[in-house]
Image (cartoon, rainbow, N blue to C red):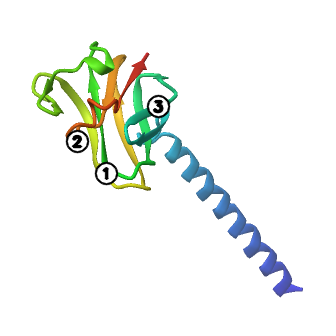
Amino acid sequence: MLRTRRASYALVAALAIATVACSSDSSSSSGSDTSTSGEVASTVKDFSITLDPTEVAAGQVKFTINNEGPSTHEFVVVQTDTAPGDLPVDGALVSEDGIDVIGEAEDIPPSTTVDLVLTLEAGQYVIICNIEGHYAQGMNAGLTVT
């Protein structure tokens, strides 16, 4: 009977410790800086970029970028009021001098998915693939951040 009581006390103590540990973990993770204000499912392929949704709240935004094309692509996020197809081009590339590149995922191989997390302020953005000739062939999309 003494063994049974000790085992019961040990079980109760273990459950109490587990409950405290779990509640401690959940409150610390909810207060961390890794939460996002929005997520954007993104597809790049020869030769388009699609975003879903095309409008998100300002703050930390997670882009999940799926390369469905047979070629390597880039995903460059530019803050600009310029329309997606009207960025300045130098040769076969968008001239990155004088534009506000917020961040990018480079060299995304075919049939892969990568994540890009950026902190975005309210405004207009253009997402492009800046591999030679890709932008001119239609690899651009607009994003509104509110």
Q: CA distance from mark 1 to mark 2?
A: 9 Å
- Element under label 2? loop
- Reading the image, the residue beneath label 1 is 72
The residue lying at 48 percent from left, 34 percent from top is 40
Q: CA distance from mark 3 to mark 2?
A: 19 Å
The residue lying at 58 percent from left, 48 percent from top is 26
The residue lying at 50 percent from left, 46 percent from top is 28
Query: Which kind of residue does numbered mark 1 sit on?
Result: Thr
> Compared with residue 123, is residue 25 higher up or lower down, i.e. above or below?
below
Contact, mark 1 vs mark 2 (Cβ under 8 Å): yes
Residue 111 in the image: state x and y as whole percent. 44, 56
Residue 141 in the image: state x and y as whole percent. 38, 26
Residue 117 in the image: state x and y as whole percent. 37, 40
The residue lying at 69 percent from left, 69 percent from top is 14
- Residue situated in front as seen by the camera: 100 or 109: 109
- Reading the image, the residue beneath label 2 is 131
Q: CA distance from mark 1 to mark 3?
A: 18 Å
- Reading the image, the residue beneath label 3 is 51
Query: Which kind of residue does numbered mark 3 sit on?
Result: Leu
